Amino acid sequence: MVQLTSAPVLALRGVSKRFGAVQALTDVHLEVHAGEVVALVGDNGAGKSTLVKTIAGVHPIDEGSIEWEGREVRINRPQDAQGLGVATVYQDLALCDNLDVVGNLFLGRELRRFGTLDEVAMEKRAKELLDTLSIRIPSVRIPIAALSGGQRQVVAIARALVGDPKIVILDEPTAALGVEQTAQVLDLVERLSERGLGVILISHNMADVKAVADTVAVLRLGRNNGAFDVASTTHEEIISAITGATENAVTRRQARIAEVAK
Amino acid sequence: MSTNKTEATAAPAVKEAPSQEPAATPAPAVDPRLLVREAGLAGYVADFKRKIKSGELGSVPVVLGLILIAAIFQSLTGNFLNADNLTNITLWIVGPGLIAVGIVFVLLLGEIDLSLGSVAGVSAAIAGVLSARQGVNEWLSILIALAAGVAIGALHGFFFAKIGVPAFVVTLAGLLAWSGLQQSVLGDKGTANVVNNGVIADLDHYFLGDGDIAITWIFAVAGIALFLAGQVLDSRRRSAAGLPARPMSEIGLRTGVLALIAIAAAYMLNQSRGLPLPLVIFLGIVIVTDFVLRRTSYGRQIFAVGGGIEAARRAGINVAWVRISVFMISAGMAALGGLFIMSQQGSADKALGSGNVLMNSIAAAVIGGTSLFGGRGKTWSALLGILVIQSIITGLDLVHVDQAIQYMITGAVLLAAVVLDSVSRRTQKSSGRG
């Protein structure tokens, strides 16, 4: 399914990050290959968001190294990450409500013709992009404010693709979505990896992770706590890696329910 | 519509053939909830009705308001619609109208600039003192006055965007401070007269070709032709690219409406003194600023900052620069407007730009349909709004209504416009168009 022979597009080696007295990340390793969906899981405060922000250039790393297509790079600013080909879709989406879909997709990198906006070319490319991703939007000319939550999420993801990135980071893309919309976003994640993009998917939802991810990287208290191949790993194994023990609140609860059932 | 759909289905299917996904990706069908417009004129009318219902009022209330105002004052005085009076209105709207154009830019960011009246006063004072008292070349003094306006705007923008002081407070301080500067520039004498028959005097008194009616007609016909050509070219390019384009019937209707207004205006102006220079400058600036807002990256950035600062920042937009530059534009427009007001009253004095000049300009922008809440509006609203305000003021003057009553009526109109803005926003929210 995923060819692991080539060098990873992105590799973090021994990354550490401190905020004052808090050691947010300690010696973290992560590899993302082209066409691979890596789920990044962990409890609240495990360091998922911090890790993503180091890749996106929001927080420069303190120790360790980041390799991009086999060579070491420094990512100190968001522009560095964008320049390499890392696109990040944050949880709060950050779309302009008053602009239409085309305006949002091309915000900050408008197509121009004789120095003025080339609306025709932008609309055409927007339609092509949305069509290849099988994204269904009522019209590319309605303001974002008129779209549903799921539609905004797919527009935000499509927006990340306008710059032809190699790695897409999705921060809990399904957290606020209904059943149908979640399925649409998961379809979209699969289509991204089919196009040869590496995807880092942050999620708390194990069903989503098992549905689309190839590998699961677990973070616990700012450290790696196992990397699993999704196909050969059970739900329980991942959860015990997240919580750090085979004896935990989740297993106790399941045992209790099983007890009652008897 | 149907041919488009089949094309769209066919194309991805071919592309995805090599990928071994079992079920072919569903075709990007049109969302069933989408209101698809009928073709032709019927569709245009139906779409228009739907927009009104869902609160996208656009210019409709203000146009209706203008017709109502004209009808009332015409019936009261019998000479409101006479050519000389209407020509005077086109002269009087230019100064406050230019300030209103500046206000539109600031409102698009969701901010407010309270200093613009004082900035207009400072600009007039500088131009007046330099040209009349110091004997500086008039063009040079105009340039210096405008540059001073832009510099003042940059200062406001710096305190707002870089230091983080609310724009309301920065410009309120500016309102006081620049009014003080205006008085100290004018000195003990208090007024600086406009140089006779000079450039600044021409700003208000010059009629193109000294009232040659041919020039008015050339402008009107050229305007209509350019509009029609632009619409047809755009429509052609869109259909060539396979995008939905305006049908010819709709283009015809729009051009027809514009032609009606342009011809009526040209006929009316020619009944009096011909085409006034200030009106040409004002219309030119409205058209250019509208183009900048809708058709350039910079304009798109202004809308983006007004619609979502975080989104704008993440898109790599230099938010601070957009904010500073918008305050420079608004103060620059106010400086230019001040010169027109000065030309009209024949001198720059300590009262220029004070009183209700600022309030009328803000009211004009809002009445014209620019939202106080940021992210929605166009510079045309400055023109429409100031026409409403000036028509009311002129009409009330014609029926000899006391100044005190005039203030109250103008205030009520402003309140009505803001109420309309708030209500239409609410209706838009409830019909899913925030």
Image (cartoon, rainbow, N blue to C red):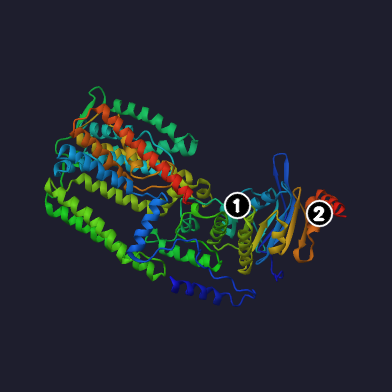
Residue A218 in the image, given as x and y percentages of width and height = 75, 55
Name the amino acid type tagged 2: Ser
- Tag 2 and tag 1, C-beta contact below 8 Å: no
| Quadrant of the image occupied by residue A200 | bottom right
* Residue linked to disc 2: A240
* Residue linked to disc 1: A90
B332 sits left or right of A229 in the view: left
In the displayed structure, would residue A153 be above or below residue B63? Answer: below
Q: Earlier in the sequence, mark 2 or mark 1?
A: 1
* Chain under callout 1: A
B156 sits left or right of A235 in the view: left
* Chain under callout 2: A
In the displayed structure, would residue A130 be above or below residue B121? Answer: below
| Quadrant of the image occupied by residue A166 | bottom right
Name the amino acid type tagged 1: Tyr
**In this rendering, the label closer to the viewer, 2 or 1:** 2
